[in-house]
Image: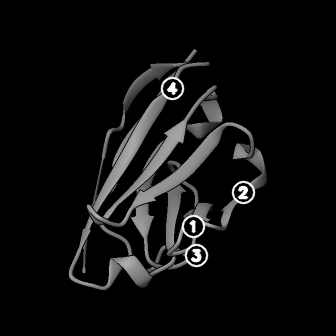
C-alpha cells in the first residue's frame, strides 16, 4: 500500500489549499478513503471520508462547510479542497485507508498563519 499526499503549504487564515493523494498497491476503486490530520503534540484526528462511488461523504464537525473530499477512481487519486482555512487547521495531513489513520502514507504539512 502506497499513499502519497501532496499539496500542502503555508497559507494565510481564510485562504485555500487543495490536497491530493496518489494511491497504489490496493484496490482503490472499491475502498473507502479517509483524510486524517495530526497537529503538533496531538493525536491523529479524523477529517473526512468518502465511499468508493463518491455517493457518501462525511466530515468532522469543525471542517463541515469548509472542506470538500473527492476522488478520481480513473487516476487512483483522492483530493481534499480546503477553503476558509483557520489557524487550528494547521497540521500534517494524511490520506488513509481507515478512520483512525493506522494505514496511512506520507503526509503533507498545512500551516495556516494569521
**Distance between the alpha carbons at the discs numbered 4 and 3:** 24 Å
Few, some or many C-alpha atoms within 10 Å of disc 2 (few <14, some 14-19, many ≥20)? few
Q: In which quarter of the image is the C terminus?
A: top right
Question: What residue is disc 4 on?
Answer: 16
Question: What residue is disc 1 on?
Answer: 50
Question: What residue is disc 3 on?
Answer: 99
Q: Which of marks 1 and 3 is in front?
A: 1
Q: Confirm or deny contact between disc 1 and disc 4 (CB under 8 A).
A: no
Q: Which residue is drawn at 32% across and 56% down?
A: 21
**In this view of the protein, can residue 90 be seen by the observer?**
no
Horizontal and vertical percent for residue 10?
39, 25
Asked which secondary structure carries label 1, the reply is strand
Horizontal and vertical percent for residue 110?
43, 37
Hey, which residue is sitting farthest right in the picture?
61
Q: Residue at x 57, y 67 (%)?
A: 50
Q: Which of marks 4 and 2 is nearer the N terminus?
A: 4
Q: Which mark is residue 60?
A: 2
**In this view of the protein, can residue 76 be seen by the observer?**
yes
Horizontal and vertical percent for residue 4?
25, 60
**Distance between the alpha carbons at the discs numbered 1 and 4:** 20 Å
Q: Which residue is drawn at 49% across and 73% down?
A: 101
Front residue (pair 42, 103): 103
Asked which secondary structure carries label 2, the reply is loop
Q: In which quarter of the image is residue 95?
A: bottom left
Asked which secondary structure carries label 4, the reply is loop
Few, some or many C-alpha atoms within 10 Å of disc 1 (few <14, some 14-19, many ≥20)? many
Q: Which of marks 1 and 2 is in front?
A: 1
Q: In this view, does 93 lie above or below 57?
A: above
Amino acid at each position: 500500500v502506497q499513499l502519497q499526499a501532496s499539496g500542502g503549504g503555508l497559507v494565510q487564515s481564510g485562504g485555500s489549499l487543495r490536497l491530493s493523494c496518489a494511491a497504489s498497491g490496493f484496490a482503490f476503486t472499491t475502498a473507502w478513503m479517509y483524510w486524517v490530520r495530526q497537529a503538533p503534540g496531538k493525536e491523529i484526528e479524523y477529517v473526512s471520508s468518502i465511499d468508493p462511488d463518491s455517493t457518501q461523504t462525511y466530515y468532522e464537525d469543525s471542517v463541515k462547510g469548509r472542506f470538500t473530499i473527492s476522488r478520481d477512481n480513473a487516476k487512483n487519486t483522492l483530493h481534499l479542497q480546503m477553503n476558509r482555512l483557520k489557524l487550528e487547521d494547521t497540521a500534517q495531513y494524511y490520506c488513509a485507508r481507515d478512520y483512525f489513520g493506522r494505514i496511512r502514507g506520507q503526509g503533507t504539512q498545512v500551516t495556516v498563519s494569521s
